[in-house]
């Protein structure tokens, strides 16, 4: 099983979310160096959903402790689900060899 978090975040303003996303894009490789996948989906102008996948529970716990102060001040509301990924399909190419 692969420890996975799904986090729904709401922000006071569009600008607050843009600040968060810029910071997340820039800093997430450093904040979560052992993550297997980090995915952020914009759902509205002021909300997004993040999915993070980790190789084990220890790494997931460490990642959560690292972000408790770094990005939290930008988020208005935070709803978190944790579980184990049980199905994973990754498609690296689609279509024919030419394209």
Image: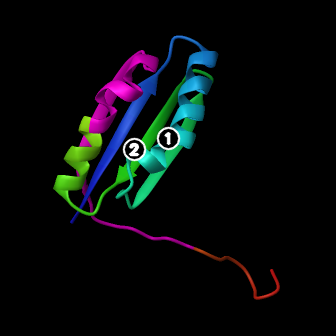
Residue 24 percent location from the top left of the image? 51, 37
Residue in the picture at 54% in, 33% down: 23
Q: Total number of numbered labels?
A: 2
- Callout 1: SS: helix
User: Mark 2 sits on what residue?
Assistant: 31
Q: Name the quadrant containing residue 18.
A: top right
Name the mark on residue 50. none
Range drawn in magenta: 66-91
Q: Name the quadrant containing residue 65.
A: top left
Residue 79 percent location from the top left of the image? 32, 28
- Callout 2: SS: helix
Residue in the picture at 17% in, 54% down: 58
User: Mark 1 sits on what residue?
Assistant: 27
Q: Quadrant of the N terminus?
A: bottom left
Residue 36 percent location from the top left of the image? 39, 61
Looking at this view, name the residue that lies furthest to the front. 30
Residue in the picture at 29% in, 28% down: 68
Spatial separation of the CA atoms under disc 1 and disc 2: 6 Å
95 left or right of 86 in image = right
In this picture, is 59 found above or below 18? below
Mark 1 touching mark 2, by CB under 8 A? Answer: yes
Looking at this view, name the residue that lies furthest to the right. 98
Dot 1 alpha-carbon crowd within 10 angstroms: few under 14, some 14 to 19, many 20 or more: some
80 in magenta: yes
């Amino acid at each position: 099983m692969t420890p996975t978090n799904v986090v729904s975040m709401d922000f006071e303003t569009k600008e607050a979310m843009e600040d968060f996303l810029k910071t997340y894009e820039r800093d997430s490789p450093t904040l979560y160096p052992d993550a297997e996948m980090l995915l952020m989906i914009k759902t509205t102008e002021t909300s997004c959903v993040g999915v993070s996948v980790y190789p084990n529970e220890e790494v997931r716990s460490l990642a959560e402790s690292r972000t408790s102060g770094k990005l939290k001040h930008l988020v208005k509301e935070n709803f978190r689900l944790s579980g184990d990924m049980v199905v994973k399909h990754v498609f690296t190419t689609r279509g024919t060899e030419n394209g």
